[in-house]
Image (cartoon, rainbow, N blue to C red):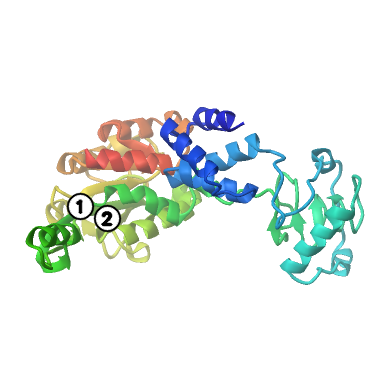
Amino acid sequence: MLLNFFSELRSAGLPVSLKEYLTLMEALDAGLSGFSAEQFYYLSRATLVKDEKNLDKFDRVFGHVFKGLEFSAEELLATIPEEWLTKLTEKFLTAEEKKMIEALGGLEKILEELRKRLEDQKGRHQGGSKWVGTAGTSPFGAYGYNPAGVRIGQDGNRNNRAVKVWDKREYRDLDDSVELGTRNIKIALRRLRKFARDGAVEELDLDDTIRSTANRGYLDIKMVPERRNTVKVLIFFDVGGSMDPHIRVCEELFSAARTEFKHMEYFYFHNCLYEGVWKNNQRRSASRLDTWKLLHTYASDYKVIFVGDAAMSPFELTHPGGSVEHWNEEPGILWLKRMADTYDKAVWLNPASEKYWHYTPSTDLIARTFAQRMFPLTLEGLDRAMKALLR
């Protein structure tokens, strides 16, 4: 079974090596997981997963390979037959009926009651108010209703009221194709951070202190300048119009970037970069920064990130006056080329699904302007973008 587990992980794309598998075998031989499925799960995850973005893939493979594995004494003592959980019908109650259903009195009480009912129940149940089943008002089961219950075997959320979801994967948002989560974005952006030694002697150099102390025979403390984050970033956000559906993920990116990068400046534009950008959307007509001034203010060693769906009329890129908001004296693509020529470390992050990019000629034109350094705004895309900025 463990060899099959190793093979399934490799097939799912996890970079699991034979050395890590042997380490897991040694840990099992040493009895580190005891006889608990939960302890074995955490042990194998700690041994075999090297990157947080692979946790969700690991969970899915683990659940597939060890489906039906017995739980420890502290966990539920009975398993639930899969056929019980088949969706046959859904329970729809009136507001008055819902008010009549009372919770059992807290999460601990609910889980304790679930243990008792799993020990007592001998068959499949549907539509009632007590046993584990489907389409009922019991706090345990699927496709029914209770204001505080345990959801078991249901393929989605219906009433948003479960206090615990038996089959929920804890790390589902850490898959590298997921677009959500400020914490996840921070992990992807972290690759870009660069540190350098500068300033006064402020920080203990532990390795050199140990080495010098061993050579001299007495304590010889060595200090080095503090390591400081030296990467400098310019971020340009497209706002309004077709970007409205992507507001949340852009906010998450903005929040994560401000945390990760000490030297960061941001500006807004609409659809395409023209002769002016702004920092306050409410005052964008009255308070703009000239793009020429921007190019001469921020040195060429800045890393530049554009965030936008790149979907617009091609005329906005190729013709004077093509902007939808004002008369632009020069084509938008000319300003983008100036930006790409000034900053050789520049990428474009596109929140739209990559499979739709080829439907808009403007997307292809912008991608070519940035030497095909356009990446989807997913964790995997962010990781590729950060690598491109480091080359």
Badge 1 local density, few (<14 within 10 Å), some, or many (20+)?
Answer: some
Residue 130: x %, y % from top left: 90, 58
Q: Are marks 2 and 1 in contact (CB under 8 Å)?
A: yes
Considering every residue shown, the one lying at the far bottom of the view is 105
The mark that comes first in sequence, 2 or 1, is 2
Using the rendered image of the protein, determine whether residue 210 is visible from the camera's viewpoint.
Answer: yes
Q: Quadrant of residue 260?
A: bottom left
- Does residue 84 appear left or right of residue 273 in this picture? right
Using the rendered image of the protein, determine whether residue 176 is visible from the camera's viewpoint.
Answer: no
Q: Quadrant of the N terminus?
A: top right
Residue 3, labelled with which disc? none
Along the viewing direction, whichever of 122 and 200 lies nearer the viewer: 122
Cα distance in 3D space between marks 2 and 1: 6 Å
Q: Which residue is mark 1?
A: 291
Q: Which residue is mark 2?
A: 277
Residue 12: x %, y % from top left: 52, 31
Residue 273: x %, y % from top left: 28, 46
Identify the amino acid type marked 1. Thr
Circle 2: element type: strand
Considering every residue shown, the one lying at the far front of the view is 217
Q: Quadrant of residue 70?
A: top right
Identify the amino acid type marked 2. Val
Circle 1: element type: helix
Along the viewing direction, whichever of 320 and 310 lies nearer the viewer: 310
